[in-house]
Amino acid sequence: MMLNKILGCLYGQALGDAFAMPAQVHPEDTERCFGWLDSWQDAPEDHIVHAGLPAGRITDDSEQAFSIARAIIEAGGVTLAAAVNGIVTWYDRVNGDNSPYVGPSTRRGVNALKAGEDPRRTGLWGDTNGAPMRIAPIGALHPGDIAGAVTDTVTVCMPTHFTGPAVSGAAAVSAAVAMAMVDSVGLADVIEAGLQGAKLGRAHGRRWFGCSVAFKIEQALAIVNSAADKRSRLRRLYDEVGATLNVPETVGAAFGLLAMAQGDPKETAILAANLSGDADTIGAIACAMAGSFAGYEAIPAEDIAVLEADEVFREYDVRGIAAGLEALLLKSGADD
């Protein structure tokens, strides 16, 4: 059962990332291109970031999560050195100095790390959504343990995203995944764990401007629970919560989609694609939580096949990563 949840987390991450990858920045442009986006599509030629990417292609969101998970497995647990290794390895793999897919906080942090700066300080300016987009595997290592998930999240955020909003957003996601790993847990409990994680995480990292992640999650939930139709609620999430690289917006929207889809991974991915904005990142986060909650078997087999046909996805041996995370879980249980 635990492996089913871990696979759900990792494949869910990739599903939300790749399915929402072609979405445009604005929902009206996504609708113009695709109508209601509910099938696998290539990125439009005029896409601001993903032009030329084929249907089913994962992006930096999943690649970074998988790279960090690999490094943690190799290290035998979550350490600052493993976090540095995971992100730098990914950066070098994609030729980060010349890649359009590297976010500003990650680029700044990695360049500082390569210059020999202290990894406990290289992330003090990192305030964009790279931290929450790659954190889900950390939550998977802490079934039901919100405090443990937050503690390891702080460590993983430190090299590139060590500001209050970034840590808070990442902690919300890892705490929700940690709770979702518990058998027969309710979706309301998963979301409540995310709110707790956001509040705990905000106490860490450099104090930084911006609204609270917990507030944005609650705002998104209020919109989702309104009586409006699906498309109207999505548009309100876009207009009122936001869908940019800003961490509270990204994480708030992701929790809203998770709730709106009632934890179903594929429906979450469809909603993320039609939300638009930074849809692949929001989708990766929301579907990692949904996959952890619903499990691998809840992801349609035809979508698994699309992901496994992607050459970039195959390079990461995601099933091997899942087995490695399960082994770490079993080891930590034996050590307790």
Image (cartoon, rainbow, N blue to C red):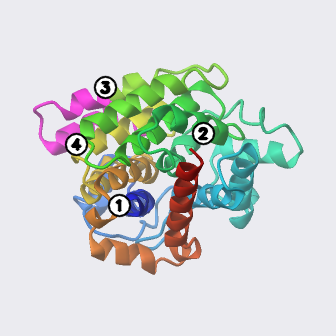
Q: Secondary structure at mark 4?
A: helix
Q: CA distance from mark 2 to mark 4?
A: 29 Å
Q: Earlier in the sequence, mark 3 or mark 2?
A: 2
Q: Residue at x 72, y 40 (%)?
A: 159
Q: Amino acid at mark 2?
A: Asp
Q: Amino acid at mark 1?
A: Met
Q: CA distance from mark 1 to mark 4?
A: 25 Å
Label for residue 152?
2
Q: Earlier in the sequence, mark 1 or mark 4?
A: 1
In depth, the one of 259 and 91 nearer the eye is: 259
In depth, the one of 29 and 20 nearer the eye is: 20
Q: Which residue is mark 1?
A: 1
Q: Amino acid at mark 3?
A: Gln
Q: Nearer the viewer, mark 2 or mark 4?
A: 2
What span is in magenta? 219-243
Q: Earlier in the sequence, mark 1 or mark 2?
A: 1
Q: Nearer the viewer, mark 1 or mark 2?
A: 1
Q: Earlier in the sequence, mark 1 or mark 3?
A: 1
Horizontal side, residue 269 vs residue 214: left or right: left
Q: CA distance from mark 1 to mark 2?
A: 23 Å
Quadrant of the rendering where the C terminus is positioned: top right
Decide: few, some or many residues near mark 2? Use Cα within 10 Å; few <14, some 14-19, many ≥20. many
Q: Which residue is mark 4?
A: 260
Residue 227 at x, y percent in the picture:
10, 32
Q: Which residue is mark 3?
A: 219
Residue 259 at x, y percent in the picture:
25, 40
Instruction: Indicate whether 174 appears above or below 206.
Output: below
Q: CA distance from mark 1 to mark 3?
A: 33 Å
Q: Secondary structure at mark 3?
A: helix
